[in-house]
Image (spheres, rainbow, N blue to C red):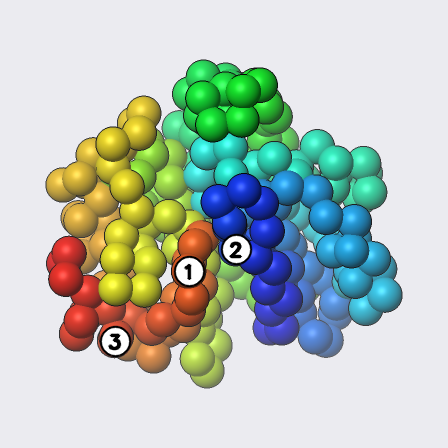
Amino acid sequence: MKVLHYEIGPMPTNTYVAYDEETMAGFMIDPAVYVPEITDKIKELGIDLQYIILTHGHFDHIEGVEAFKKDFPNIKVICHSEEREMLKSGALNSSLDFRGWPYTTDADQTVRHRETLKVGNLELTFFHTPGHSKGGISIYVPGTPGYCFSGDTLFRRSIGRSDFYGGDFRTLINSIKDVLFYLPDDTVVLPGHMGPTTIAEEKRGNPFV
């Protein structure tokens, strides 16, 4: 798997484009805002972008969805079933408060805890990791090393906020300890904000857990 990283949007947010080098099938994680240069790069590399995967529904992770769908009309948007209400409400996804106008979108399909998805030769496993929001997910792709797109659940030496709608601090801690910390220690964690880390580093040094 190859991963392209873009730090974009008002917060700023990490948007990722990942693809299978053999088949060139790919997916996008959390399009924070629309950046046409990302589309240009995808087309330049010949990536067959099949999915937009949303780790959760906050505005700073979803505002590029509708525009990228226009660039890639066959793409499917994926989220957890408990996150759709946020996608469809500018009040719940905080776009109204932070941006002054409501941004809404919706998913084409939803996933459950431990459901898998094939993208080319890659097999993605979705883990329900609530606490930052009700339907937050983390996406694990095995390999040497494996990768985990953790959204706003786990950051480098930090964790996501739990004071927004649907958040709960204890639930968030449990998602990290009971789900993410069972991934292999060498798993590279690619979070929704800030820089990458590994599961081993966070077990050893994350002050919140």
Q: Position of residue 94 (x, y in %)?
A: 44, 25
How far, Cα to Cα, is label 1 from label 3? 17 Å
- SS at mark 3? helix
- Report the residue at 18% width, 49% height from top: 173
In the rendered image, the quadrant that contains the C terminus is bottom left
Q: In this rendering, is residue 208 above or below 88?
A: below
Could one spot residue 71 in this view of the protein?
A: yes
Q: Amino acid at mark 3?
A: Ala
Mark 2 in CB contact with mark 1 (< 8 angstroms): yes
- Report the residue at 47% width, 77% height from top: 143
Dot 3 corresponds to which residue? 200
Is residue 27 shown left or right of residue 128? right
- Report the residue at 64% width, 55% height from top: 27
Q: Position of residue 72 (x, y in %)?
A: 80, 44
Dot 1 corresponds to which residue? 194
Is residue 79 shown left or right of residue 204? right
In the rendered structure, which disc, 3 or 2, sits on the residue that comes first in sequence? 2
Q: Position of residue 169 (x, y in %)?
A: 17, 39
- SS at mark 1? loop
Q: Amino acid at mark 1?
A: Met
Badge 1 density bin: few <14, some 14–19, many ≥20, Cα 10 Å: some
